[in-house]
Image: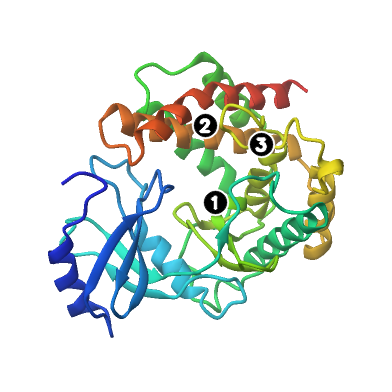
Amino acid sequence: MAEHQLPFQALNIYLHAHVAGFVELQAIDKFAGGQSNPSYKLTATSGNYVLRTQPLGRLLKSAHQVDREYKVMKALADSGVPVPQMVHLAVDENPLSRQFFVMEYLDGRVLWDPELVGLDKEQRAPIYTELCKVLAAIHSVDVAEVGLLDYGRPGNYFERQVGVWARNYRASVDASDAGVERLIAWLESNMPPDDHQTSLVHGDYRLDNVMFHRDQPTAIGVLDWELSTLGHPMADLAYQCMQWRLPSDGGMRGLGSVDRAKMGIPSEQEYVEQYCSLCGIDWPNHWAFYIAFSFFRLAAILQGVYKRYLDGNASNPETAVRYGKTVPVLVSLALEEIER
């Protein structure tokens, strides 16, 4: 079965048996994104749904855990963090022969371009303000109250994460790049002391993983929780702030060369200050480490996507090739940060 094809009739029978109120599958359409876990719009007589599944092929350990995505979004249903309603999790025998879940289809807009081209200047800042508010809300979730106390290991978050992504990167290449190894060594030698901050972290928090209301600067759903866990909130904040440093060419959709003041988009400093104000904290120490770590982790993620392309299992081969070409750029930006 090709990556973009799902067994229509078998899935129709399965969903009718396992999803309350489900009536007659009519169409399956793959969303353009979803390099890691492919997502599909299901059109049925009973309404629209979204199916999100593990990809085909050999999977890296701890990757593509759609069951964790399902668990965290289900837990956040009444938390104040906007998420779609979870409908069904398929773990055991099912027509896809791999884990998948079904969730509510949200009728909103995904803003792929951080420059927010197509919006008026005065419409842009409210979008970023909403992004910041939602991130602060995620980090303010009482994990014990929503049943996520066991969702990750508290403490030593960055130490564990550097180890995980170093292993994942090395498993995705035939020979490790010297620049990457230098970056890993620097991260290991400049690890911030554990300050025991632990919160729910999204893991891939950025503009295009948040769905907005069609006409208002209001988030209606935070998506793509594959990398979520209990960890350090600065990992999410710095990861999003990479957007301000990434180039705006080469398909990377960054804000590095954009006149943000002219566009009505806040600067990185303004965004971080707003987040700190919302959370009642001071400007974070060790900011250079958090930024360098974020670039490294993204490089490791994209190298893994490229490896899936080389193995013939990429969800979108053309995009996977482009991702592979961006890895050296990300490593270079991280090295520039630590040299600075």
> Residue 255 is drawn in which quadrant?
top right
Could you give the CA–CA distance between mark 2 and mark 1, rounded to whole angstroms? 14 Å
Three-letter code for the amino acid on which mark 3 is drawn: Gly
Residue 86 drawn at (x, y percent): 40, 73
Nearer to me, 142 or 329: 329
Could you give the CA–CA distance between mark 3 and mark 2, rounded to whole angstroms? 15 Å
User: Could you tell me if the residues under marks 1 and 3 are in contact, i.e. CB atoms within 8 Å?
Assistant: no
Q: Is residue 66 left or right of residue 121?
A: left
Q: Earlier in the sequence, mark 2 or mark 1?
A: 1
Nearer to me, 74 or 338: 74
Residue at mark 1: 203
Residue at mark 3: 254
Say few, some or many: other residues with alpha carbon within 10 Å of mark 3 (under 14 / 14 to 19 / 20 or more): many
Residue at mark 2: 299
Say few, some or many: other residues with alpha carbon within 10 Å of mark 2 (under 14 / 14 to 19 / 20 or more): many
Three-letter code for the amino acid on which mark 1 is drawn: Gly
Q: Earlier in the sequence, mark 1 or mark 3?
A: 1
Quadrant of the frame with the C terminus: top right
> Residue 288 is drawn in which quadrant?
top right
Q: Residue at x 36, y 58 (%)?
A: 66
Could you give the CA–CA distance between mark 1 and mark 3, rounded to whole angstroms? 18 Å
Image mark count: 3
Secondary element under disc 3, as helix, strand or loop, is: loop
Residue 219 drawn at (x, y percent): 63, 67
Placement of 146 over or under 330, stated as above or below: below
Nearer to me, 26 or 33: 26
Three-letter code for the amino acid on which mark 2 is drawn: Ala
